[in-house]
Amino acid sequence: MSKFKKKKGGELPAISTASLPDIVFMLLFFFMVATVMRQNTLMIENKLPVADQIEKLDKKDLVMYIYAGKPSSRYRASAGNQARIQLNDKFADVSEIKAFVLAERASKREELIPFLTTALKVDGSTNMGLVGDIKKELRDIQALKINYTTRTGSATDNLK
Amino acid sequence: MMKKSAPSVNAGSMADIAFLLLIFFLISTTIETDYGITRKLPPLIDKPTEGTIKEKNLFRVELNQHGELLVEGATMRINALKEAAINFLDNGGGSGDLACSYCKGSRRTSSSDNPNKAVISLHNHRETNYATYIAVQNELVAAYTTLRNREAQRLFGKTFVQMEKDLKDVNYSGNKKILKENIKKIQFLFPEKLSEAEPKK
């Protein structure tokens, strides 16, 4: 009787998967910390123009987004093919911007209201008329800090 | 008698649960940060002030519906706009009270007196393309930034862009109060006076 049994040859030992949950949890925590919730589902084409004199828009909770552009192909039948404004997941009219800004302001703490920025995410092929209308509404309601959101690149690429 | 050991909980499905959560977060969140040109809109005034700006202190930039750029009435390519704006702002043609000691321009009397007086007026048409407008905005902002960088380099030994970056940097070792004042000084030397009229019909 021997204490040392001969190992059975051939068969590989199973790889332990006990640490797999740990690895996945690590990834999960990374994504939970480093990302923010997606806010809006775009219903318009949104190919932003490029610029290089840009600043970072940090403090995402102090930014309200106004999207504008031509409705994407799914919505073209119902919304037409002229450039439209999108606020909070739905198409909106220029006159609804004031209500939108007021609602955003109401949801913020009072001392933060002066720091609210409006980010204009406008498709490059939109006419300036629509953008001018948006700006006029924003001026009417004293939302003067705006940011033309762009991609990074040389400005002359816009003309191609 | 041996004590019964507690049965171990099967943790095999923990990975599946974690994966499920992971995939949820992957699809419902974004990691991107936005960048853009930050501007301040002028407040609404009932009566616009007129006639106080001299013609020579005004740099007219016009964009028509075909995306053509008109600077002081002459067509210009967008690549040349930055240089033209710099020449206008940095001209320093004034004398006496209006003299500009730090300007390095050609000091022509037909162009702006002082960067404090110089106003760039941007006109656009309702049918102008937004991308073209952004390109023009970008070039005009670039003109101001170039001049501010030059002065900041001369006075404080680093560029204006770097100063603004330092101001936001939490790990900046210097005195932020002084830095803030220095930034104000530079902004006073070259104030951003960019006026935009309502788009033409």
Image: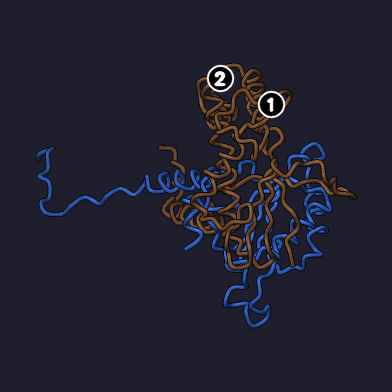
**Label 2 Cα crowd, 10 Å radius (few <14 / some 14-19 / many 20+):** few
Dot 2: chain letter: B
Quadrant of residue A79 within the rendered picture: bottom right
Q: Earlier in the sequence, mark 1 or mark 2?
A: 1
The x, y position of residue B168, in whole percent, is: 59, 30
Q: In this rendered view, identify the residue nearer to me: B10 or A105.
A: A105
Q: Which residue is mark 2?
A: B155
What amino acid is found at the position of numbered circle 2 in the picture? Leu
Which residue is more in the foreground, B31 or B185? B185
Q: Please state if A8 lies on the left or on the right of A36 as rendered.
A: left
Q: Which residue is mark 1?
A: B95
Colour given to chain B in the rendered image:
brown
- Residue placed at 65% from the left, 48% from the top? A147
Q: Which residue is at the far front?
A: B109
The chain painted blue is A
Q: Nearer the viewer, mark 1 or mark 2?
A: 1
Point out residue B36 in the picture as x, y percentages from the top left corner: 59, 48
Residue B122, percent from left and from top: 67, 52
Residue under the image location 43 percent in, 52 percent down:
B15
The answer to whether residue B35 shows anywhere in this view is no
Task: Say if residue B173 shows up in the picture.
Answer: yes
Q: Position of residue A87 (x, y in %)?
A: 71, 62
- At horizontal 69% and vertical 44% (from top left) the residue drawn is B58
